[in-house]
Amino acid sequence: MVAITDKLAIIYVPCASNEEAKSIASKLVREKLAACVNIYQTTSMYIWKGEMEAQPESVMFVKTSTSKVQSAIKRIKELHSYDVPAILSWEVQSHNRDYSDWAENQLK
């Protein structure tokens, strides 16, 4: 059960493909580690082995509670194909109460 003192959190996770993102997202939601996951197509640019890279990726925005962030991150690492996935989280500072009530219900 999600404690009443829990706050909403977002976890940002780029994935190699839309299929990988959907697979991870569905597991997180089914396992009650996420209330909802949004998936967006993007391009990531970075230097790898001295060369500029521009790779298509699918980014997940995982909506969860602060008490479930560490468990969700652990599960994402188990499922993710990257050797060093970027998994970043932050606490939501403001939100509408109806949504947070719904999310809390999904995480029970």
Image (tube, helix red, strand yellow):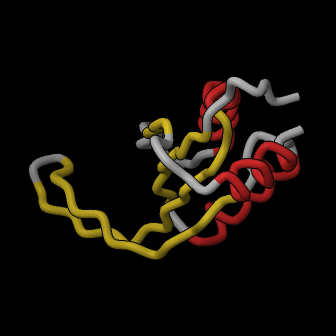
Q: Position of residue 91 (x, y in %)?
A: 49, 36
Looking at the image, the residue that sits furthest to the front is: 97
Q: Quadrant of the C terminus?
A: top right
Occupied quadrant, residue 2: top right
Looking at the rendering, which quadrant does residue 19 occupy? Answer: bottom right
Residue sitting nearer the eye, 58 or 94? 94
Up-down relation of residue 90 to residue 28 (above or below): above
In the rendered image, residue 44, in percent from the top left (x then y), is placed at 30, 64
Identify the residue shown where x is 50% and y is 72%. Answer: 40
Q: Position of residue 105 (x, y in %)?
A: 86, 46
Of the 4 image quadrants, the one containing the N terminus is top right
19 is higher (above) or lower (below) than 80? below
| Residue toward you, 33 or 56 | 33
Residue at 32 percent across and 71 percent down: it is 43
Drawn side of residue 15 relative to residue 55, left or right: right
Left or right of 49 in this view: 71:
right
Q: Left of 14 or right of it: where is 53?
A: left
Label total for image: 0
Is residue 2 shown above or below 37?
above
Image coordinates for residue 22, horizontal then vertical, percent = 69, 65
Q: Is residue 70 above or below residue 80?
A: above
- Residue closest to the far left: 50
Q: Going 16% across and 52% down the picture, which residue do you hit? A: 47
